[in-house]
Image: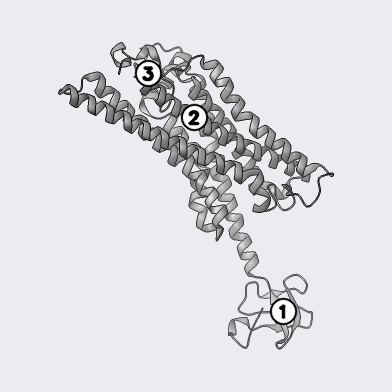
Amino acid sequence: MLEPEVTSDDEHYLLLNGSIFGPHHIPSMLSPGRDYCMEVIPDLGLRTLVCFQEEEQKKTGDFRLTFYACGLLISVPFLVLTIIAYCITPRLMDVHGKSLCHYCGCLAVAFIALAITQLSSNHLSDEMCISTAFVIQFSFVACFFWLNVMCIETYMLARRYMTSGCSAAHEPQRLFFYYSLWAWSPPAILIIVSMIMDLSPTVPMTYIKPNFGSQSCWFQSDVEAMPYFYVPVGLLLVSNIALFTMTAVAITRHQRDLDLRRLRQDRETNRDERRTLGRLKRLFLVCLSLFFLMGMNWAMEIISWWAGGDPLAWSAFDLVNALQGILVFGIFVLRKPIRHLVWYEIQKIRGVEGAEPEVASMDRSLLTVLNIDAIPSTQRML
């Protein structure tokens, strides 16, 4: 509302053609019915109402969405390269490596679909918009479940290694099959329920529906997103935090047991014990890095939804989340042990012969299942 009697910046003049001239506004010419309206307000009289701030917010929001979409598209090639690097390296394609590939695949699909909606949602048909929303929902939820699978495998790896000195799971193919059932079945059930609730005309309007496509190619509001997205994702994040905590506690206890064993023997730790301690410490650091990289970013998404406020205040977390593909590639591919294995396989594909790199079992990747054959027999007894 313009108040020329309060500030001179609101000075304006009504012209004969119905337009308003505001010398201190941009644009200075306001067309009737589009740029302004006039309303009789009690105790104030005839007032001119102009909506400048909404347009400014829209421009800011559009810039933020475009910036976020570019980050998503930048991440996709790195996620694809991570999948390729693991697929061409047989020594990395164990239970954890396969889980990582599925995680990266789901994340890449989700990022592509989300970037499409951010950049061209106004040009999508209603059917395409709703279909894309279902793809985003399924891909992200499946991504969280595969992250949960990696957390479970991390905990089981540490537990097997510290209790029996053996870290390889029995029948890894069967184990991965069970992991796949856990990672794919709940997202599939959730997407079927969402489709029935959203598309079936027999569902009462009093029920909470996703309402995809009503205002955007996503849920209509946070109220609709809560049961179909935020609640399952939040539960998985809590589960991951618990698994990482139990893993860290188990590693700490094992380190303390090794120290007590050394004191009882009244001698310095031998080479195998020092090697075991070093690998367990690296495993502990890996747990922390995975927690902060993959867990905390998604936790910030949940917190930003719950806390509300200015979306620009959460832009830094959104950008880090959008660039997650680069971080995943750096941690799971560019580290020296994995990088050497991948480069060796690339050279083999090119026909260049070379010595296969000797990589310690726990150094082979961050969290991959250990190869029993690579562990010295004396170390297995620890």
Q: Quadrant of the C terminus?
A: top left
Is residue 26 or residue 34 the one in the foreground? 34
Is residue 66 or residue 40 the one in the foreground? 40
Amino acid at dot 1: Ile
Quarter location, residue 138:
top right
Under circle 1, the secondary element is strand
- Relative vertical location of residue 50 with respect to residue 353 in this rendering, above or below: below
Horizontal and vertical percent for residue 229? Answer: 63, 44
Report the residue that reaches farthest toward the right: 202
The residues bearing labels 3 and 1 have C-alpha atoms spaced at a distance of: 83 Å
Label 2: how many Cα within 10 Å (few below 14, some 14–19, many 20+): some
Amino acid at dot 3: Ser
Is residue 176 or residue 330 the one in the foreground? 176
**Which label was assigned to residue 164?**
3
In the rendered structure, the answer to whether residue 49 lies left or right of residue 110 reads: right
Quarter location, residue 42:
bottom right
The residues bearing labels 1 and 2 have C-alpha atoms spaced at a distance of: 66 Å
Q: Which residue is mark 1?
A: 20
Specify which label sits upstream in the sequence, 3 or 2.
Answer: 2
Which of the two marks, 1 or 2, is nearer to us in this view?
2
Specify which label sits upstream in the sequence, 3 or 1.
Answer: 1
Q: Quadrant of the N terminus?
A: bottom right
Is residue 337 or residue 178 the one in the foreground? 178
Residue depicted at 55% across the width and 31% down the height: 146
